[in-house]
Image: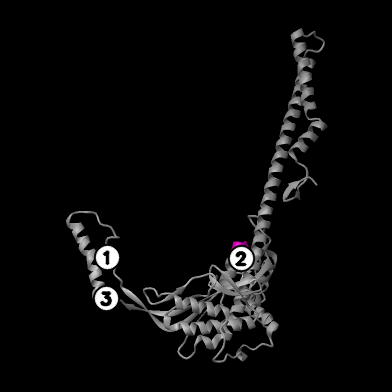
Amino acid sequence: MSTEISRKDLYAAVWDRPVRDVAAELNISDVALGKICRRHQIPVPGRGYWARLRAGKRPHRPRLQKQDTCGPTLIFIRGSQVRDYKCSLTSLTEQFAEFELSSVSFGPQRRLSKHAEQLQAHLQSRRADGHSLLNVDSRSLFRVCISKAAIHRTVIFIDELCKFAEAAGFSFMESDHGVGLRYNKEFIPIQISEIVSRMPHARSEHGVERRLQPEVHCALFRRERRMTSARDEPTRREWDLAPSGRLEVQIDNGEQGDGLRRKFADGKTQRIEEILNLIIESAILCTAAASERRARRIRLDTARHEARRFAEQQQWQEAKERERVRLLQEARTDWVEAYKTDIFVCWIRDKHKGQKLPEEASWFLAWCERHAEDLRQRWSINRITRAVRHKDLMGDEVVDGRIGNP
């Protein structure tokens, strides 16, 4: 289950109830909730807080401070998803509630489905590998890895699975993982394999002779001091894979760790043909899980986009603030320089009041007055308006993802 909660609400929850109770509601452990609170700088009650509270005391409760780093305001908590998938299963099964999987019966002379016929023809035309296994890896067929003795049983199981799936509302889709089930725009791959046991390889006389030949060549190379590599060494087969006749079904070989069962195999008293109801039910749960994962990815992408947009907005604000400060400092510097120049001119004229100044001194004082006036005129209203408009320093509103004028 994926939960969205704000820092303020999570802070209120962990201080109103014990962390263990809050974690149980979010379908996570108390350790995981503690890590989430530390990551988002949310204080949690210390040891003995609830005992002191029950005793009538008023223990210290720290306030929720602002985060050091900017980020999204919502916290996404991913808990155990089995409960959500069970609810999705209930809603999905309501669409075909009148259909009972156990009521489907197949006579001895039934016609195979299209996928079962194609798989049977392909398996009968293939050769087994060194371990006596037939490995089918095609886009238009179910992915299987079985022995020749299990062909008939595998084809019958595929035929029953196809008919059960069609009755349950599934369709079939080809992909790089072979043919799989599709429901609500979600693809569930299916793989059927035969459980094998590893046995020590028994060498035949012909095999021993074939393996002695490269050993003789390698010995000859070593005597002649010629270079040998690992490719010149004889390959010795240590193990053989012996098919056991037990079949195993793997569905949705994607994300794991969500508490859903994806493997079904023959047991001591039960075969996979007898648990088709459970396999179809697990396929429905996997589709609900895939839909939930897709929705969670969309939410996380949206949160990351908002965080990135918020960071860009902060950077634009800081850059504009620096530019405004620089413009103000430049204007103040010119105004202070003009003010000091006027004071200097006034001081010279007051000091030599009533005296006739030399022509050169009078010219210099007149130039100082003009220079001070130029400094003041440099920062006129028109000049300030042009500078603010050129640097786009007005307002902090966001326009098309960027900060601009209102």
10 Å neighbourhood of mark 2: few (<14), some, or many (≥20)?
some
Q: What residue do we see at 67% from left, 59% from top? A: 72
Give the side of residue 74 with respect to residue 274, left or right. Answer: right
Q: Which of 280 and 62 is in front in this view?
A: 280
Q: What residue type is labelled 1?
A: Pro
Q: Where is residue 202 in the image (x, y as percent from the top left)?
A: 28, 77
N-terminal label among 2 and 1: 2
Q: What residue type is labelled 2?
A: Cys
Residue 37: numbered disc = 2
Q: Position of residue 212 (x, y in %)?
A: 22, 68
Residue 229 figure quarter: bottom left
Q: What residue do we see at 77% from left, 8% from top? A: 359
N-terminal label among 2 and 3: 2
Residue 234: numbered disc = 1
The residue labelled by disc 3 is 203
Q: What residue do we see at 75% from left, 14% from top? A: 364
The magenta segment is 37-43
* Distance of label 3 from label 1 (alpha carbons): 14 Å
Query: Is 389 drawn above or below residue 95 in the view shown?
Result: above
Query: Is 335 drawn above or below residue 62 in the view shown?
Result: above
* Element under disc 3: loop
N-terminal label among 3 and 1: 3
